[in-house]
Amino acid sequence: MNWRKKIRNKRLWNPFQKNGEHRITFEKEGFVSHLLNDNKNENQNSQLLPASIAIIYKSELDYISRCILDYTNIETGGQLFGYWTAEDVPVVLYAIGPGPRANHQVAFFNQDIDYLIHVGRPIVEHFGLQHIGEWHSHHQLGLAQPSSHDANTMMSTIQEKHLGKFLLCIGNCTNTSSTLNAFNFSEFNQNYVKAKWCIKDINSPFREKIDNELAPFLLHPKTKVGNMDNLYLVNIQQNLPPEYKDSYWFSIKENRQILKQIMDTLGQCTIQQDKDGFIYLIREYGDVVDTIFFPDGFPQQAPRVMRPHTDNSIIESSVSWNYTGDIYNDFINYYNQTIGL
């Protein structure tokens, strides 16, 4: 393992140091990086917004969820490794959580620097991944985006170190489930962009390899099963569909196009998937939030339309479902009757 000897004396820089807060990332170095920097078109790049999409593998979402659920009342965090596409879209191939001496507090998190060095260096230098971002949780604070301190520190660091771009993910949780929002930052634009997740519904090809090779260094979450929900996802046409049961209506391409048509008609919809692989929509308009669930037996079985009541109870549609073979029109008619709940 000669790579383990090489990582010990490498210089690291610390871009996040304020009020006792320490976070680090790895410098760009090498011939290719110099070529890229020498050929930047500053005027062209300065006009570009950060990408509106972030790609992540299912195994890494699950891993981060487990880390967050270890600390449901205080902050936790870690780093993200992968690469950037030609369109500056981040691809998360491997995530790490907090080290054994990380500092978890109600309103801030400090990574264990020694842990990040021992784990991060071989991920970058031996496995060839890039350090593309970091994540931390706001647990149950109700803040689902970067704080002003997060955003200001991230932007000043990217500009000072000429990183070009960086991904920051913010997690939230209840006692039983978690979510994760992605935010892309760019050196050439003052505004960060909330990115929609494009989830690859397979395990990262690097998860098992790195876990095995870095077993003496890695600290894994105690929570054994992750539970991510309420993710901000790309629309159907942008995302590669995951594997569904052959009998499930959404496994048919034509039906996915019908759902896209339904979403376009309803407007203000996001599509999500539960842990069993079934599709549901979240429709937000004004103060109203409807959840539309498509069960295993849909379209023969009725969809479920649910809406929170003012007393925090859930009202569910009792309208009869009359399926005639026309999914789009049958659903729109059903929803128009249900909307009077």
Image (spheres, rainbow, N blue to C red):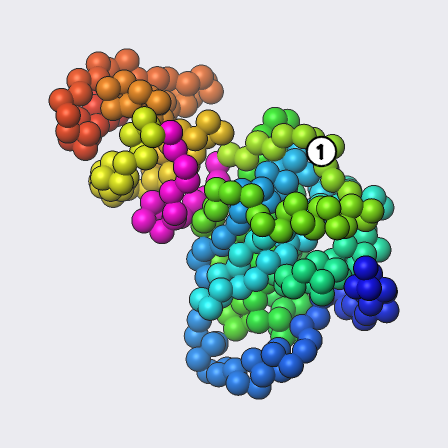
Left or right of residue 223: residue 250? left
- Is 279 on the left-hand or right-hand side of 100? left
Q: Residues within 10 Å of mark 1 (few under 14, many from 20)?
A: some
Query: Where residue 124 sits: x, y (%)?
Result: 69, 63
Which residue is under mark 1? 70
Look at 21% across and 17% down and name the residue there: 321
Q: Residue at x 51, y 70 (%)?
A: 189
Q: In the rendered view, would you say 280 is above or below 212?
A: above
Q: Quadrant of the N terminus?
A: bottom right
Q: Going 81% across and 48% down the picture, which residue do you hit? A: 217
- The amino acid type found where label 1 is placed reads Asp
Residue 292 visible in the snapshot: no
* Magenta-drawn stretch, dominant element (helix, strand or loop): loop
Q: Quadrant of residue 152?
A: bottom right
Q: Is residue 85 visible?
A: yes
Residue 178 drawn at (x, y percent):
58, 35
Image x and y of residue 108, in percent: 73, 47
Q: Which image quadrant is residue 139 in? A: top right
Report the residue that reaches farthest toward the bottom. 38
Along the viewing direction, whichever of 299 and 230 lies nearer the viewer: 299
Region of the chain picked out in magenta, as a range: 230-245
Q: Is residue 73 left or right of residue 34?
A: right
Q: Total label count?
A: 1
Secondary element type, mark 1: helix
Depicted 167 relative to depicted 251: above or below: below
Quarter occupied by the C terminus: top left
Residue 134 at x, y percent in the picture: 65, 54
Viewer-nearest residue: 172 or 312 = 172
Residue 243 highlighted magenta (yes or no): yes
Task: Report the residue at 75% width, 60% height from top.
Answer: 122
User: Magenta segment: does it hold 48?
Assistant: no
